[in-house]
Image (cartoon, rainbow, N blue to C red):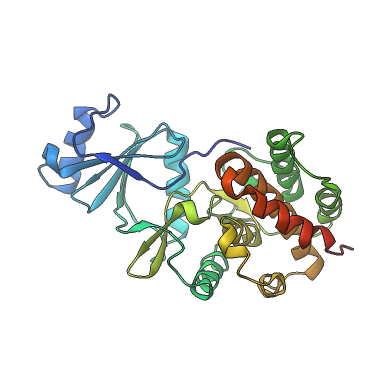
Amino acid sequence: MPENLISGILIETGNHMKNQFLSSEILTDIEQKLKIKIDERDLCYFTSGKSEATVFSIREQFLIKVCSRPELLVYQTFLSKNKTSYFQKIKYINFDLGYICLTFTKGHQYQDDLSVEYLLSTVFNITSNYQLIDYQGFGYLFEDHKTWSEFLEDEVSYSTSILGDDIFDIAKVQEALSLISKYPVGQFLLHGDLGVHNFIVNRSKLYVIDPMGLVGDPVYDFYYALFSDHQIFLSIPLDLILNYFNRDINYKKMMIIIVFYIRLCRAFKYDRENYRYYLDYYCQYLNKLSLS
């Protein structure tokens, strides 16, 4: 499982932060493309998760990311297929200089300030409208797996390597993996890192940033988002989660077990304070699901 290409909430680091990767050539090109004159005071720099990208806004109107070509291609591919109001819009991309100009998403990171009902319906609306993509294989863009189950196996293997001995018996996860390969899956283009860390809230509406680009089943992103915060999944009955998407019920159970395990690993790495909620939920609910 690759480290995030571009992930995490953008955190303001100050208007006068200098960055060695931001060249005057890029600023000049931006001025020409946007037909504006940029002053130092117009710029606000951000951090960008684990990415090496340089990220800054211009007058809270545009967001500029200076990053690698694969990252630019991920943005171009995903946002060109997802032009809803939930996502940023591409103003233009300069592959030669290595940057992308996006519309700026105003707001704050999700802080448990949306109703669970709204969050559930919105995440379903986002994921159920993903588009099919003509692509060879599954998994993260440009890191192909031959099958969907092969991608899931790789994610579970990576998660297990992180969790190590600090984990319960994962026989249920292994059972789900052994059975899921018999179910056909379409090649949809998913966000790939859908969760509260990439949710922006503005005027009680949800917006999403930082796609990673993943080819697979939208059910994956739906569960991945709901399991990104313990306060969300503890507030939604498991039976209600299983009602969403027109898939075989056993397949959905398998996906829930697998995706939850992947999310459990993320909690272990990045949210250790709430890790116990994931363990308790797995033992109380998911470990008891009957698969066939």
**Residue 186 falls in which quadrant of the image?**
bottom right
- The foreground one among 7 and 139 is 7
Figure check: 172 above or below 130: above
Figure quadrant of the N terminus: top right
62 displayed left or right of 66? left
- The percent position of residue 288, horizontal first and vertical second, equals 84, 62
Q: Residue furthest top?
A: 20
| Whether residue 32 can be seen here | no
Instruction: Residue at 56%, 45% (x, y): give it.
Output: 271
- The foreground one among 146 and 214 is 214
| Whether residue 67 can be seen here | yes
212 displayed left or right of 187? left
- The foreground one among 20 and 36 is 20
- The foreground one among 205 and 148 is 205
**Residue 13 falls in which quadrant of the image?**
top left
Instruction: Residue at 50%, 69% (x, y): give it.
Output: 119
- The percent position of residue 152, horizontal first and vertical second, equals 72, 47
Figure check: 267 above or below 183: above
Figure quadrant of the C terminus: bottom right
- The percent position of residue 27, horizontal first and vertical second, equals 19, 35
- The percent position of residue 177, horizontal first and vertical second, equals 81, 50
**Residue 270 falls in which quadrant of the image?**
top right
